[in-house]
Image (cartoon, rainbow, N blue to C red):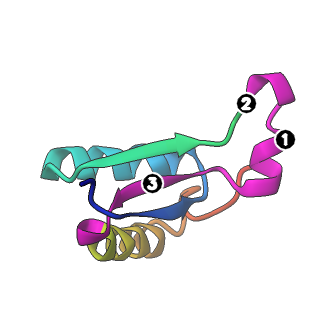
Amino acid sequence: MRDASERLPLHNEAEASLLHGILEEDGVPHIIRSFHDRAYDGLWQMQEGWGYVETSVRFAGGVRALLEVLRKNHPSSELGKEED
């Protein structure tokens, strides 16, 4: 049986990339998915947001906390801000 998973929203590609690197380094199983679709020229991203990170419920609390820290500690960057 597959573990239950949780999806956490991501605001932009920079945030997704940084989070992926940290989770990869720490060995946390996850999938990052962008809602971008070239066929619709980003229409889904305008409606749904940039994308999400999906991880096991077991790791979701830690990933959520890490996202909060990343967004708080990078106020001068594009982290935590929507891309146009």
First in sequence, mark 2 or 1: give its number. 2
- Measured as percent of width and height from the top left, residue 16 is found at 47, 48
Extreme residue toward the front, this view: 1
Q: Is residue 71 left or right of residue 42?
A: left
The answer to whether residue 36 shows anywhere in this view is: yes
Q: Is residue 72 left or right of residue 28?
A: right
Q: Amino acid at mark 2?
A: Asp
- Measured as percent of width and height from the top left, residue 46 is found at 82, 51
State the residue in front, 47 or 12: 47
Give the alpha-carbon distance from disc 2 to disc 1, as whole Å. Answer: 7 Å
State the residue in front, 25 or 8: 8
The residue at which mark 2 appears reads as 37
First in sequence, mark 3 or 2: give its number. 2
Chain part drawn in magenta:
37-59
Extreme residue toward the top, this view: 39
Mark 1 falls on what kind of element?
Answer: helix
Q: Amino acid at mark 3?
A: Val
Q: Residue at x 22, y 44 (%)?
A: 24
The answer to whether residue 84 shows anywhere in this view is: no
Which quadrant of the structure image shows residue 1?
A: bottom left
The residue at which mark 3 appears reads as 53
The residue at which mark 1 appears reads as 43
Asked if residue 3 is positioned above or below residue 39 in the image, the reply reads below
Which quadrant of the structure image shows residue 6?
A: bottom left
Q: Residue at x 73, y 30 (%)?
A: 37
Determine contact: label 2, label 1, CB under 8 Å: yes
Q: Amino acid at mark 1?
A: Leu
